[in-house]
Amino acid sequence: MTRDHHLREDKQAFLVTLKQRGIRDHRVLDAMMTVPREAFVGSDQAEFAYDDRPLQIEEGQTISQPYVVALMTEAMQLEPDDTVLEIGTGSGYAAAVLSRIVEKVYTVERHRVLANLSQERLANQGYDNVSVLCGDGTLGWPEHAPFDAIVVTAGAPDMPQSLVRQLVIGGRLVVPVDAGLHQQLLRVTRTGEEETETEKLGGVRFVPLIGEEGWRDRE
């Protein structure tokens, strides 16, 4: 049996897993099936691409568990003409998934190696509605604000106010925030110039969000 055949079978099982775990938005499911996760990991990890678990990537970082990518994408309540900001590009996989659902994706990565690699992978795969910036993601990307939705793929000590201010009124921020012994995934909706509403979506575990409005870099 060929590697491609194995991957196709794994991908079908992967779709079943996402549905069983409660992902309902057909646009999210279609995007997760369209984007080849194996193209965003090293060749030594490709056979595990459709396992529902994180995988190691460059710079000591990870590519998120597929269910978590789907959960956070669904939580943003996206529309086709939305502009989305992602904080923490990593391998570029989640940005590629978002690019199949919305009009434009901006993504910020603090590691230069990862920013360059993800830009290369996204370009090679033809995801031409994604722009990558190497910088401090806790400060967002003000030049392209406001955004309809923002997703943060690292755990913040508390709510990054720069990101809240870069949402449109009615925009949604999905972010893991420190909650003592664990992290809580939150959806924050900007309801007015200074008003927000916050919903708790469950416990998660992410690497720390490093930056001016995040944790201090201990490296």
Image: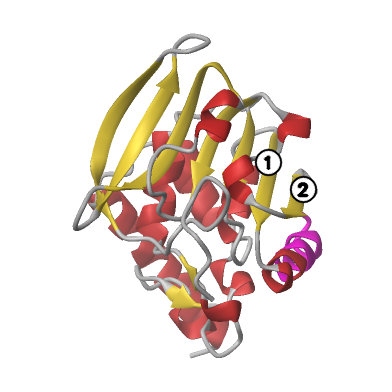
Disc 2 to disc 1, C-alpha distance: 6 Å
- Helix, strand or loop for disc 2: strand
CA neighbours of label 2 inside 10 A, class few (<14), some (14 to 19), many (20+): some
Residue at x 76% of width, y 43% of height: 129
Colour scheme of the rendered structure = secondary structure
Question: In the rendered view, would you say 104 is above or below 42?
Answer: above
CA neighbours of label 1 inside 10 A, class few (<14), some (14 to 19), many (20+): many
Q: Which mark is residue 197?
A: none
Q: Nearer the viewer, residue 36 or 192?
A: 192
Give, as a three-letter code, the residue at label 2. Answer: Ser
Judge from the rendering whether residue 56 lies leftward or rightward of residue 137; answer left or right.
Answer: left
Residue at numbered disc 1:
105
The mark nearer the N terminus, 2 or 1, is: 1
Residue at x 75% of width, y 53% of height: 132
Give, as a three-letter code, the residue at label 1. Answer: Val
Please tell me whether residue 136 belongs to the stretch shown in magenta.
Answer: no
Extreme-top residue of the structure: 192
Q: Which mark is residue 131?
A: 2
Highlighted magenta segment, given as a residue range: 117-126
Residue at x 70% of width, y 43% of height: 106
- Residue 163 picture quarter: top right
Residue at x 61% of width, y 70% of height: 40
Q: Nearer the viewer, residue 172 or 128?
A: 172
Q: Specify whether residue 100 is in view.
A: no
Q: Position of residue 218 (x, y in %)?
A: 49, 71
Q: Main secondary structure of the magenta part?
A: helix
Q: Are marks 2 and 1 in contact (CB under 8 Å)?
A: yes
Please tell me whether residue 125 belongs to the stretch shown in magenta.
Answer: yes
Q: Position of residue 130 (x, y in %)?
A: 74, 47
